Amino acid sequence: MPKTDDTIELPEITVSDIDRCLQTGIFQKTFSGAACIASVGGRVFHRGVYGSLNQSPPLKKLDHQALFDLSSLTMPLGSGLAALKLASNNRLDLNASVNTTIPALRDKRFAKITIDMLLDHTSGLPAMRSYWKEVLEHDEGQIASQKVCGTQKAIELVQEMLSKTILEYEPGARTIYSDIGFLILGWIIEGVVGKPLDVFLAREIFQPLGIADDLFFVRLDDPRQRQWLYRRPFVATEECEWREKMIIGEVHDPNAWCVGGVAGHCGLFGTADAVWKLVHAMWSSYRGESREFLGGTVRRFWTRSRRLRDTTRTLAWDTPSSLGSSCGKRFSKTSVGHTGYTGTSIWIDLSTDVIGVVLTNAIHPTREGKTEKMEELWPRIYELIAKHGEAQPRDPEHKTGAAAFSSGPGTTVPLNNPTRGPGKPSGW
């Protein structure tokens, strides 16, 4: 797999009304900071950052190195992408039953659930369960050496609880967005590849694309990684009562946190640049312009599931709903995208080749009242992205990869920036 260049041009190209829309979100305290990248045909026409890493003094200005908790974008960009990669190489049968994968699912209740049902949210599993609460209760009153939160023992406890989970509907009969399904998917992938999910993604996908330093999971039990991350600019999420701190640089989702920070449904952190590069690589493969991923498999993952007539889901992704969507009304029906609870989003219009990545920390310093505000902001920002994307002159050569950033003045920045601290631990 080809590697990206050691340096890329990173110009500041912004569109004024997109700027205003995101700056309004900061002024209204919907979020303290945001990053946005938009492109059409592989050419970036907007790349801007806004606000600060946090909302309380001393404010720390947000820049292009800012790392966001991507929340549920971990599904399409993490475990879902790993499943795509393995399916492309015939190492994962998406039609296989999940009860042949991990011991917790051996019960016959899970026999009808296939891996692709986890991917398109038709597994029958509930949307979520607060497994983390029982793990914390187990740890209450224990001495430090006997606490299990964030360890392999916590994973075993969660899997034991999972084995007793009652299905809410017949597999394949309905669509219910399920964190639990992707939590399971992450463990299935680890069983197939024989290594942790974060290690597989870093070595097989992120490193070859040159983005492993800017797209990764944060492990709770890795002091070497902590040393490397010490100087990195993480965007703050929420003040957590039971963790007794503002969450910065560790996963917000409590189930992902209790199993150590690496999970199939949440846990990825990344910069807007890294997210765009990864999505761009998938789009290039979809168009047949790149061999990063098998184009046929990408097309399968980006096509609406035929299992149910009224679903908007694809494998690990979503599509616009006729009842309203976060991508607004200008993105076509053939668009695919996803959002994350922390205030993150991606949309790709496969008809116009417009890609939008908008990352915020909308749950900072609290989630209260933010859902409604983001439901209003998402369509506005993506309608602006679509409008300006449609107005851009098309590059007949479909400028892609590092070259997509070189359409204006900018600073050449090494991908492995020495100011970021010690090198990443080996094995990443």
Image (spheres, rainbow, N blue to C red):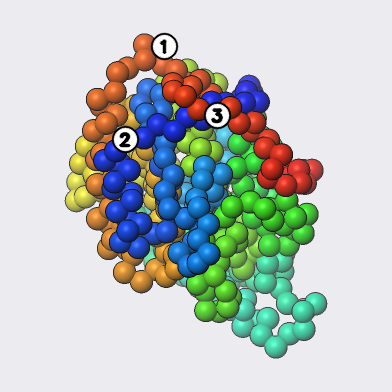
Question: Mark 3 and mark 1: span between their CA atoms?
Answer: 24 Å
Label 1 neighbour load within 10 Å: few <14, some 14-19, many 20+: few
User: In front of the other: label 3 or label 1?
Assistant: 3
Question: Disc number at residue 397?
Answer: 1
Image location (x, y in percent) of residue 153? 72, 69
Up/down of 264 relative to 277, above or below = below
Which amino acid type corresponds to the residue marked 2 in the rendered image? Val
Up/down of 330 relative to 143, above or below = above
The answer to which image quadrant residue 103 occupies is bottom right
Question: In the rendered image, is residue 419 in sight?
Answer: yes
Identify the residue at the far front of this view: 58
Image location (x, y in percent) of residue 303? 36, 35
Q: Are marks 3 and 2 in contact (CB under 8 Å)?
A: no
The answer to which image quadrant residue 183 occupies is bottom right
Q: Residue at coordinates 58% horizontally, 27% vertically from top-left? A: 412
Q: Are marks 1 and 2 in contact (CB under 8 Å)?
A: no
Question: Mark 1 and mark 2: span between their CA atoms?
Answer: 23 Å
Image location (x, y in percent) of residue 40? 35, 26
Q: Secondary structure at mark 3?
A: strand
Quarter of the image with the N terminus is top right
Image location (x, y in percent) of residue 295? 47, 24
Number of labels in the image equals 3
Q: Secondary structure at mark 2?
A: loop
Which residue lies under the disc numbered 3?
Answer: 411
Q: In terms of sequence position, does the residue under pointer 1 or pointer 2 come before the other?
A: 2
Q: In terms of sequence position, does the residue under pointer 3 or pointer 1 come before the other?
A: 1
Which residue lies under the disc numbered 2?
Answer: 15
Quarter of the image with the C terminus is top right
Identify the residue at the far top of this view: 396
Question: Mark 3 and mark 2: span between their CA atoms?
Answer: 19 Å
